[in-house]
Image: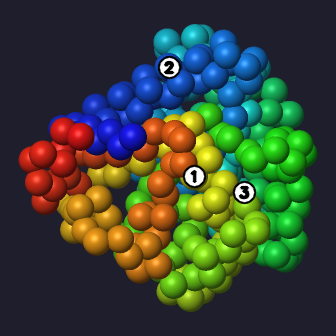
Amino acid sequence: MTIIKTYPNLEVLSAAAAELFAEKSCQAVEKKGRCNVVLAGGETPRRTYELLAEKPYCHTIPWQNVHFYWSDERCVPSDNSLSNQNMARQSLLDHVPIPEANIHPIVYENSPSMAAEEYEKILQSTFKKHTPQFDVVFLGLGDNGHTASLFPGTDALIIRDHWVRPVYVAEQQLYRVTLTPPILNQAASVIFLVTGSTKAHVIKEVIEGPRESIRLPAQSIQPVHGELYWLLDHEAAALLNLETKYL
Ligand code: 6PG
């Protein structure tokens, strides 16, 4: 099921995203005693993470039962400003009572493929070889249609026998490590956070356009049994047809 919600600006969208996360995480912990979350990188989710570190969420979310993973990581040192782990720690994880054992970053030392292999082992031990079902997956959207580090035309988009892959992003001259569609699409709730007029065209193509998931990787995110949320600000949603906006 796809749910599209639009908001006046990033602040209101982030408040809604924080509330949705609180609802989903409490439900998961109540149901199975644990909530497995995938954090998105980039800048858009930062405000949502900051709000989750503030009242009421810093007190109401059962942090000791929540485990954090990442959708992708840039192959840089963890203290680098480009690191998605660094952003999540600075905006959220360093400010809530979460055990370090509940934080599962993608660790890059000197080999992107080693980092991917090691992360796949972490996921396999988490899910004990079962199909991994994350409870909440946050994702962003690049203006070229990428999500996580699933970039147009890269083989991570067509891989079916790995949950984690290394990717070289030529336009950034940067290696990354990314979760792949098969694992992301098992999630119970996938939540895209997208803002700004620069994303309006790609949002229209991804949501309303024909299926071209190699050119528009975000289209490969189709939860098998779960919910797909698009939380958009009015600028990002500006080109959508009215009936789409209120799916
Ligand atoms: C990353 C993200 C990436 C991001 C988009 C949108 O590591 O860069 O995983 O997929 O979500 O590029 O980034 P912004 O939120 O900064 O626009």
Q: Which SS class for mark 1?
A: loop
Q: CA distance from mark 2 to mark 1?
A: 20 Å
Q: Amino acid at mark 1?
A: Asn
Can residue 80 be seen here? The reply is: no
Q: Residue furthest left?
A: 242
Q: Residues within 10 Å of mark 1 (few under 14, many from 20)?
A: many
Where is 247 relative to 166, above or below? above
Look at 43% across and 23% down and name the residue there. Answer: 19
Amino acid on which disc 2 is placed: Glu
Residue at the disc numbered 2? 23
Question: Residue 97, percent across and down?
Answer: 72, 20
Q: Which residue is mark 3?
A: 79
Q: Of the residues shown, which amino acid type is indicated by label 3?
A: Asp
Examine the image and state in which quarter residue 12 appears. top left
Q: Identify the image's colour scheme: rainbow, by chain, secondary structure or one colour.
A: rainbow
Q: Which residue is mark 1?
A: 185
